[in-house]
DNA sequence: ACCTGAACACCGTTCAAGT
DNA sequence: ACCTGAACACCGTTCAAGT
């Protein structure tokens, strides 16, 4: 293997550099991350890092991908609702484990859903729900957008119970024009992000079921109805 | 007014700097943006910029806020579904108008929904849907996460019809393990982002209506039923 | 051939000097 | 007092010299 040879030649491995870079980024965040710091961390020349990765941008891309591989994607079950939730929870867990790396996904996985395996599960789940293909593709991507958006918001510090400072800010708003905000203040103070995530996935799933049901009724080719009413 | 005085004193206004900074960021993007470039653009010293904004980070925060103000938020209608859609479309429009600035919202509006007015509309819509307050707050934030996630994905180049390169990549996957992905390829090639966004908002709305309906049935205080079946 | 050091152009910010 | 220039510590990358 020529790969083994090039490994033997030098102690500095590309994968070692990536590991060090990932760890640095994961702990200090993007603003404090630099190629040069990775280099001193490994005791090598900054240019050695760039020789392996071409540019800082390529290194960041590699860090983003390395992050994705750190989460185990679920396998298919018999229940499409559970499958959607499993994929959603997997990405949310990823964001929780590596909140500073997570934003990179949006920047560098811009060509499609982050992982083919997970998107396959999502697409399959939506087809199993009874949705026609024309809807399943777009709603699959929309589900991704929701999950990643939720996880990103959490990683950036949004979507947690509001603190006393924010409460005071909202209290200061005009009570009449902001009456709904005012009314929800007590709930916002004790908001549980995990429960909120579950709730919103349930909403999405219920909406999909509703849409799938409508489509099925419209074209009653094989109308096995699990609803209570005929 | 002391403000007018300080204006007269010097030609260089804080708002002028912000305008120039916003335009630069909006056109060249974050990686090519710098405080120094803003300075040369205005013919002033780099330190003059920082004197007004404290730090680059504060300037970026100001750019993010300035972006938000460039979109007119909708006013309340009689239909909570339309109100949700209107807010969603407003943010999506913002992302379309300023795709490079848009990612800053996630980084700097981390303390809550970007705009109090729009979040009030969202909260009010969800309360009008019949949801209890305990659900309305979290689902309001989840709706934000979805809308911003979708808009961000679009701004970053995701969520558009796939090109020939991506098609080839997906075609190369094992047809059996990726059979749903394979089946949806024709749809993914002609995906319409606007229609997809509308569809997914409809799904969310249908899910909310479903949940609100269930809650109402559980506590039948005022059970006016619009369903076909008793 | 693969790797890496010096040099370059640039960056945000400190700090003291200017008005 | 408000503003700004010089200086500092750092950055990613080019490029030619090392092995």
Image (spheres, coloured by chain):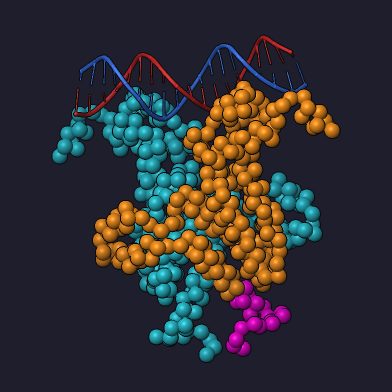
Chain colours: A orange, B cyan, C blue, D red
In percent of width and height, residue B64 lies at 40, 44
Residue positioned most to the left: B1
Residue A132 visible in rendering: no
**Residue A212 inside the magenta-drawn segment:** yes
Asked where in the image residue A202 lies, by quadrant, the reply is bottom right
Q: Is residue A20 above or below residue A112?
A: above
In percent of width and height, residue A77 lies at 70, 67
Which secondary structure class fits the magenta region best? loop
Residue at figure coordinates x 26%, y 66% from the top left: A176
The one of B164 and A194 positioned closer to us in this rendering: A194
Q: Is residue B202 left or right of residue A141?
A: left
In percent of width and height, residue A102 lies at 55, 47
Residue at figure coordinates x 52%, y 71% from the top left: B207
| Residue extent of the magenta highlight | A211-230
**Residue A30 inside the magenta-drawn segment:** no
Residue B135 visible in rendering: yes
Residue positioned most to the right: A1
Residue at figure coordinates x 52%, y 34% from the top left: A33
Q: Is residue A49 above or below residue A200?
A: above
Q: Is residue A6 left or right of residue B75?
A: right
Residue at figure coordinates x 36%, y 41% from the top left: B62
The one of A160 and A205 positioned closer to us in this rendering: A160
Q: How many marks?
A: 0
The one of A115 and B2 positioned closer to us in this rendering: A115
Q: Is residue B62 left or right of residue A49?
A: left
Asked where in the image residue A52 lies, by quadrant, the reply is top right
């Amino acid at each position: 293997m020529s790969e083994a040879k090039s490994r033997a030649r030098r102690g500095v491995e590309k994968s070692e550099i990536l590991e060090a870079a990932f760890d640095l980024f994961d702990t200090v965040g993007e603003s404090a991350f630099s190629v040069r710091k990775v280099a001193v961390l490994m005791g090598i020349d900054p240019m050695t890092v760039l020789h392996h990765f071409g540019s800082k941008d390529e290194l960041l891309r590699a860090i983003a991908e390395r992050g994705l591989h750190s989460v185990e994607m679920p396998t298919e079950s018999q229940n499409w609702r559970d499958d959607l939730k499993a994929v959603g929870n997997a990405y949310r867990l990823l964001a929780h484990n590596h909140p500073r790396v997570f934003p990179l996904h949006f920047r560098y996985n811009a060509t499609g859903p982050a992982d083919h395996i997970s998107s396959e599960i999502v697409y399959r789940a939506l087809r199993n729900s009874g949705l026609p293909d024309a809807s399943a593709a777009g709603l699959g991507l929309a589900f991704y957008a929701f999950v990643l958006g939720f996880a990103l918001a959490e990683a950036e510090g949004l979507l947690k119970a509001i603190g006393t400072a924010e409460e005071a800010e909202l209290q200061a708003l005009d009570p009449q024009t902001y009456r709904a905000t005012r009314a929800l203040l007590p709930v916002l103070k004790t908001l549980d992000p995990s429960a909120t995530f579950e709730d919103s996935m349930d909403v999405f799933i219920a909406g999909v079921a509703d849409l799938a049901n409508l489509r099925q009724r419209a074209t009653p080719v094989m109308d096995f109805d699990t609803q209570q009413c005929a």
